[in-house]
Amino acid sequence: MIASRLGELAALLTAVLWAFTALYFTLASTRVGVLAVNRTRLVFAVLLLGATHLLFYGTLLPLSAPLESWLWLGLSGLIGLTLGDSFLFQSYIELGPRKATLIMSSWPIFSALMGIAFLGEALTWLEFLGILVTLAGISWVVLERSPTTGPVRNGRLGRGTAFALGGALCQAAGLVAAKEGLREGVSSLSGTLIRMVVATLGILIVTVALGGVRESFDKLRDRRALLYTACGAATGPFVGVWLSLYAVSHAKVGVASALMAPVPVLLLPLVWIFFKERISRRAFLGTLVAFMGVALLLLEN
């Protein structure tokens, strides 16, 4: 039974890892800023993935992968990792990791809408219901006016929500591009490495163009932020993203996505422990409603 459910187990483990990733990157970003964390974690991820690829396949890079796969997976990396995660990390600072990942969990909604726009797919009544339920759960939690503690900045609700929604849009677009890149038989490890390499090159080019190289090295002197970033890189863009592509390749997309969605639920005890953020009954119930909406949306896939 376990062997036949490896895809589902990988998806569930991905959600657990991404919950810790959100925590680590929030802690790092509040110390050295979003851009420094994004640059550093991608470099860490490329080193870890390259070493693993060498161990498994005998090469540092999947140079034998088709050019079309490189193009699609590279585009996926630029959209989802370079741009999308920059939005997401900023939303961690503005809203805190729990609310940010809750809004981010709406990315399957955008995936469904992109399917209508670009693939000619049609939503069923069950999927429309899932969209309404998910948005209701997200709105219920985000619009809560009760005071909170932790890294959330007062008066930044709209700004943080916009960043999180931007991250969700990029996540959806990145997934569509990644699925195209994996069609040629590229393994999940090779696909993940291609995404990371291109995303890293993209953000390094932007860093050089903006003259932020010296600033990046200066911020690396913060050893605690560096440790948080390294831990987040291991749980997120290294093992987490690798497992997410494995899950999509070995299980139904709807099932895998639903199992990867409960990151906000898994974050509830973490933000209570590390940030002393009070978790109200409304926040807990709203998070569950949002997750149920995502699961409902994906039942037809």
Image (cartoon, rainbow, N blue to C red):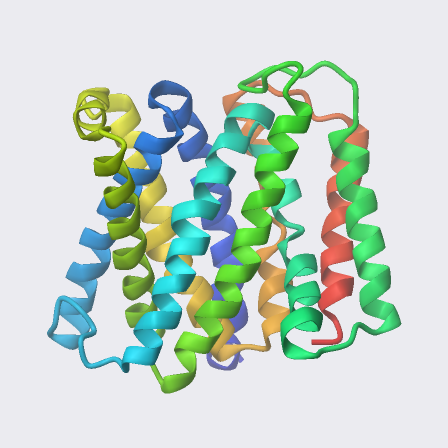
Rendered location of residue 268, percent (x, y): 62, 34
Residue at left offset 31%, top offset 35%: 229
Query: Residue at coordinates 69% horizontally, 66% vertically from top-left?
Result: 112
Q: Classify 74 as above or below 167.
A: below
- In the displayed structure, does residue 143 sit left or right of residue 23? right
Q: Is residue 253 visible?
A: yes
The residue lying toward the viewer, choosing from 48 and 39, is 39
User: In this picture, is 202 found above or below 206?
Assistant: below
- Where in the figure is residue 11, as x and y percent of width and height? 52, 63
Q: Position of residue 296 (x, y in %)?
A: 78, 63
Say above or below: 157 vs 207: above
The picture places residue 101, in percent across and down from the top left corner, at 59, 41
Task: Residue at the far bottom: name it.
Answer: 184
Residue at the image position 22 percent from the left and 28 percent from the top: 216
Quadrant housing the C terminus: bottom right
Q: Is residue 90 above or below residue 10?
A: above
Query: In this rendering, does residue 264 appear at all?
Result: no
**165, 3: nearer the viewer:** 165
Q: Nearer the viewer, residue 78 or 149?
A: 78
Q: Residue at x 47, y 35 (%)?
A: 89
Residue reaching furthest to the front: 209
Tell whether 288 sits left or right of 133. Answer: left
Q: How many marks?
A: 0
Horizontal relation, residue 207 to residue 81: left or right = left
Instruction: Name which quarter of the figure residue 287 lies in.
Output: top right
